[in-house]
Amino acid sequence: MQLAHVDSGRSVGPRTIERHAATRSDAATRIAATTESQASDAARHARSARTAPMRGGLRSFDIQLNQRIAAVQRTVEFLERADAQLQSIRTALAAHIGPGRAEPASDIIAELSYKIHQFESLWRERVAATGGALDSQLDQVEPGEAQLRFKVRGLTIDTLANGEPETLYLAVGGRTQHAVAVVIEPGLDATAIAQRFDRALAPSGVRVSRDRHGELVFSVRETDWANTRDILAIKGDGRRFPTGQFAIPRIVPEEPLVRPDLWTVDSPMARRATLQQVIDAQEAVRHARQLALEMLSDEGHRLQTADATARAQEGKWCEDFVRTFATTAGRRDYRTLAALSSAVHGIHRDRVRALLLRM
């Protein structure tokens, strides 16, 4: 999958960038210094020259943008592989479902099971294959930010909004010595409760919000899920959590949108149910792929627009610099010639032509 063409100027390293900027700035400064008392226009153009826009490869050197585009491209590739495998399963199942169809032989059942197992293995690679840019609900997120949402038994708006005041202590990752406190008191509404939990747990990588039903929903990066699921501990004052000691509550994770681990083919009813689940999964995968392609298209359009703007700004800078250079060179005094000769020393016609051909 290729993105729309981005300016392919020669790649440069950090030291090259510094030398290029320093040389341009120094030359412009020295030229302007020779005529400050005689030409205010030349000085103004020289100052603008020092803020010239970056060229070619530098404009496209945006680490976060490149990472985001690469993650979306990887997501598209992953979803295409998933779609192909789902279509294979769908075709195989449909061939053995329907009125008058005989029970498939054992080797056919084994082949169906193998196809499902193969897809399940692929689906377990989702986070790694997409760079953490596709979550369990097939939503596109920033690279590495795929979240898994869950609820904590005992922490509901009803139990927290009613009853006596209490201070709850929550420890993430088994670090009870670094537990954070959340004060619950009468009169708090659901939004305020969610905000208190979110402020307390955010430094530990756990975020808290409200779902569409108004209940508290917690979320962590999928890569941190194993630790959070097993060792999120809570202690209260003995009211909502009676023991008064740290205890691991029951955590209920959000169901993933695609569950190949539940697909079976052992009976006609199971095969029909699995076929419908495969169809639903394929529709979700194709929808996610379409959204990813649209995202790539939008990024490509934005880059082309930004590139056109940068080229226009660069053209204006070049015109200003040429005008400044010509004005300064035309003065023919010794200080000007000394500044110009050192600035252009070593620049030959062939090098200038080669540079212009790259523009």
Image (tube, helix red, strand yellow):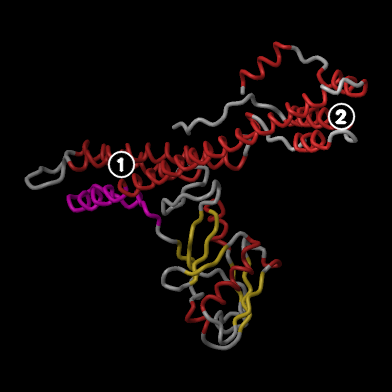
Query: Quadrant where the N terminus lies?
Result: top left
Please give the residue where the numbered disc 2 appears in the rendered image: 30
Distance Cα–Cα, label 2 vs label 1? 67 Å
- In the rendered image of this protein, does residue 214 appear above or below residue 29? below
Residue located farthest toward the right when viewing the structure as drawn: 334
Query: Which amino acid, mark 1?
Result: Leu
Given residues 330 and 296, the one toward you in this image is: 330
- In the rendered image of this protein, does residue 285 appear above or below residue 230? above
Given residues 29 and 211, the one toward you in this image is: 29
Tell me if mark 2 has few (under 14), some (14-19) or many (20+) residues whose alpha carbon lies within 10 angstroms of its own: some
Query: Does residue 53 appear to the left or right of 226 in the view shown?
Result: right
Could you tell me if residue 250 is visible in this image? no
Mark 1 residue element: helix
The reply to whether discs 2 and 1 touch (Cβ–Cβ < 8 Å) is no
Please give the residue where the numbered disc 1 appears in the rendered image: 86
Q: Quadrant of residue 124?
A: top left
Residue 61 rendering spot, x and y as whole percentages: 63, 35
Find residue 156 and name its label.
none
The mark that comes first in sequence, 2 or 1, is 2
Which contiguous range is marked in magenta?
A: 256-281
Residue visible at 77% across and 15% down in the picture: 347
Given residues 338 and 289, the one toward you in this image is: 338
